[in-house]
Image (spheres, grey):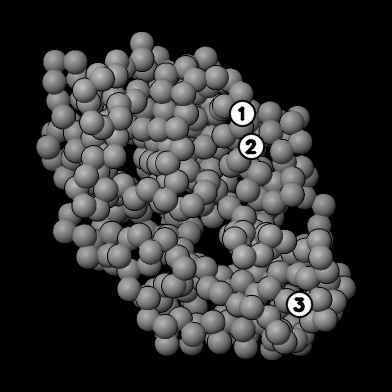
Amino acid sequence: MPWSLPLASPTPRVDLAIVGAGVSGCALAASLRQRGWWGSIDLLEIGRGPGGRAATRTSRQDDGLRINHGAPLFNIRAQTPPALVKALAQRGLIRPFSGSIQSLDAQRRLGPAIADGFSDGSLWQGAGGMDRLCGGLLDLAAEQGGALNRRFGTLVRHLRPERSKAGVSWTLQDASGASVVEARWLVLSGTLLAHPRGRQVFGWTEIPLEQAAQQLADPQLSAAQAQLASIDAQASCNLLATLPQESAQAWRALHWDLLQCSPTAQERWGLRRIGVQPLADGRCVVVAESSPAFSAAHLDVYGSRSSAAQLLGATPEPTAEAQVLDALREALIDLTGLSLTGAQTQLMRWGAAFPIDPGLDPNHRLCPASAIGFCGDSLAGDGFGRIEGALSSAEALAEVLVPQL
């Protein structure tokens, strides 16, 4: 039964708050609706739109610019794919990836695609951009009915649980301590609020979920929080280069759309993958993803336009950012032998792009005594660290959450 909304309450109340509008957060909303639950949902996201690393970057000043700045595609390795994949494909929101994937070694020799964990199985991409994946999931949720409020550009900084005779409820607060929403149930689709990196990198005084777990004294929640806090992750630095038509022609003529760098090539150039994305007006975008070693050596460098800089309190260092961009640019030119003349470049960085085993025990995906659940690619099991895991974890959580809701 939906939570009643007192008219005098200054803070909105909802049945479920989902923090994070990446793949798993959006998939959870869609999966709950497909299972016939119509309660009110607030979806809170620090970015200006859904998608996370599966987003498509746009520009208010350049209507023709669309950059798949994180994941250029996603793969499904399970024999029985997540049900949401079929639903999205039937509506034409995603389509099979039809581009060419090749590999490169340290001697610049091209070869077939290599098994890097992200390019085997069935390959998919958003129809018109990777943003159609999460945008499509939210469309699926909306077409089923029920209240779904999307709060983009919203930083959740504090988690305040309250125990009463009716059970546990949650108040989510921003950095100033102002209440954003009160929820009967809470789901975290990422690890930031449970992980010590917020304290280490952004100077937070506490780990929000750890503080909440101590207050609730729920052994299952404490175990889940400890596991989430222990998950290491690889960072990723991406160079985004938008080339004018005259420089784009050589890039658009390449025989590959996605180039994987072998381990020896990664060691030589500090690059992991390179993607070429033609634009409709004759320009193209080149996305060069750094190697894990390069990213680890530049953990303290943030893009000036990143959420970490704009909302989380990280202080960008323009000189360091320029040095990282120059290093990636020089490596890309040296590797390909192609020009970046006239290119507009920017840095996109994720501090925790790829979680490292072990992940969260699926037995802790739902903590009923604390009215909280978890989904995302950080859950252990098939699809760990990939979009497939984000989708399947959301479906699995929805299955056990609906009876509780």
Outermost residue to the top: 1
Type of the residue with mark 1: Leu
Give the crowd class for mark 1: few <14, some 14-19, many >=20 residues within 10 Å.
many
Q: Residue at x 69, y 33 (%)?
A: 88
Please indicate whether residue 67 sits to the left or right of residue 367 in the image. Answer: right
Nearest the eye: 119 or 133: 133
Q: Which residue is mark 2?
A: 136
- Percent coordinates x, y for residue 20 in the rendering: 43, 44
Type of the residue with mark 3: Pro
Q: Nearer the viewer, mark 3 or mark 2?
A: 3
Nearest the eye: 36 or 334: 36
Please indicate whether residue 110 sits to the left or right of residue 389 in the image. Answer: right
Q: Which residue is mark 1?
A: 140
Label 3 sits on a secondary structure element that is loop
- Percent coordinates x, y for residue 73 in the rendering: 68, 53
Q: Which residue is mark 3?
A: 244
**Pointers 2 and 1 in contact (CB under 8 A)?**
yes
Give the crowd class for mark 3: few <14, some 14-19, many >=20 residues within 10 Å.
some
**Pointers 3 and 2 in contact (CB under 8 A)?**
no
Quadrant containing the N terminus is top left
- Percent coordinates x, y for residue 46 in the rendering: 41, 51
Nearest the eye: 173 or 111: 173
Label 1 sits on a secondary structure element that is helix
The residues tagged by marks 3 and 2 sit, at their Cα atoms, a distance apart of 30 Å
